[in-house]
Amino acid sequence: MTFWSGKRILLTGGAGFFGTQVVNQLLKNGARPDNIHIPRSKEIDLRIWENCVKVVKDTDIVIHLAAKVGGIGFNQNFPGQLFYDNAIMGIQVIEAARQAGVKKCVIVGTICAYPKFTPVPFKEDDLWNGYPEETNAPYGLAKKMLLVQSQAYRQEYGFNSIYLLPVNLYGPGDNFDPASSHVIPALIKKFTEAKRDKKSSVEVWGTGSASREFLYVEDAARGIVLAAEHYNKPDPVNLGSGAEITIRDLVDLIRDLTGFAGDIHWDTSKPDGQPKRRLDVERAKKEFGFEAQMPFRKGLKKTIQWYQEHSGEVNKPEDPGHHC
């Protein structure tokens, strides 16, 4: 018998880039395929209350991954939608789960919830010490409200809801749609196509001075499942690799790995986003034994190889991921 034996699981966002890896990890850890319910956004709109009531029925554990997300440009163009859709989905899923007597909720938030100027490495205790970076604040704050809700429900109702903060994810199967993709898939697509089309240069947003931390999607999925199995406290928990890289160094690395030999043009009129981002990952290690395993260069090579093998396909997952 494992933790997952016989448990009925609702996995919102389970058909997306991140969700499919969480499914794989659940199966690996003993969950039965017919006990994992994945509502598809095309058929079940979680912004509608009745749908949330319907999907949580006869469920033991809810893992809420579903989100509307995108890169800096997407956040600038659709801040209202990003706030409303993410807040209303999460709030209703948690309330419906509470009413239905669900035993545990695992809520996946976002590191966009952190203040713009957070001391590096980001510690969970710094989460409320300022306003998020403006370009993704509506999204970050909408997801952050689910932490408030989780803690309030634990206090008033004894409801076991936990809140995790994964850093930027990447890996095979990522969202490469230029309208909503994030920095790694966007760069891989740009450099791969520039090499194919024999372009002399590639344009990249910003100055390159901002730093980011990235977590391989399989590592992140393992972290989610470990937390579901072992963590039952109100405090939020970071999920990350604990290592950062500047965007300039990331661009150089992806250029090398894709074999592009041209120049880089930095469009400094475009925003950099949050200046620095690296997480303190000690709480996850201490509470449920999570540590990232995939070396960054190796993970990038796997992601580039996947894209080059699938670049002829339109890839617009229902849930592109949880990063900004």
Image (cartoon, helix red, strand yellow):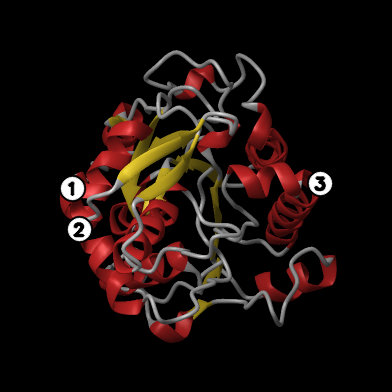
The quarter of the displayed image where residue 203 is located: top left
Verify CB contact (< 8 Å) between mark 3 and mark 1: no
Q: Which of the pair 190/81 is nearer the observer?
A: 190
| Tags 1 and 2 touching, CB below 8 Å | yes
Residue 20 rendering spot, x and y as whole percentages: 42, 71
Residue 152 appears in the rendering: no
Which comes before the other along the chain, label 3 or label 1?
3
Which amino acid is tagged 3? Gly
Residue type marked 2: Lys
Above or below 324: residue 122: above
* Residue type indicated by callout 1: Arg
Q: Is 136 placed left or right of 312 in the picture?
A: right
Q: In the rendered view, tell whether residue 310 sits above or below residue 295.
A: below
Q: Residue at x 45, y 42 (%)?
A: 204
Q: Earlier in the sequence, mark 3 or mark 2?
A: 3
For marks 3 and 2, give the one nearer the viewer: 2
Q: Residue at the far bottom: name it.
A: 34
> Which residue does the numbered mark 1 point to in the structure image?
297
**CA distance separating discs 3 and 2:** 36 Å
Q: Where residue 62 appears, x then y in whole percent?
A: 56, 62
Give the alpha-carbon distance from disc 1 to disc 2, as whole Å: 6 Å
Q: Estimate how packed mark 2 is, as few (under 14), some (14 to 19) or many (20 or more) residues with alpha carbons within 10 Å.
A: some
Do we see residue 251 in this rendering?
yes
For the image, the number of numbered tags is: 3
On the rendered structure, is 95 left or right of 266? right
What residue would you read off at disc 3? 80
The N terminus is located in which quarter?
bottom left
Q: CA distance from mark 3 to mark 1?
A: 36 Å
Q: Which residue is mark 2?
A: 301
Name the one closer to the observer, 37 or 87.
87
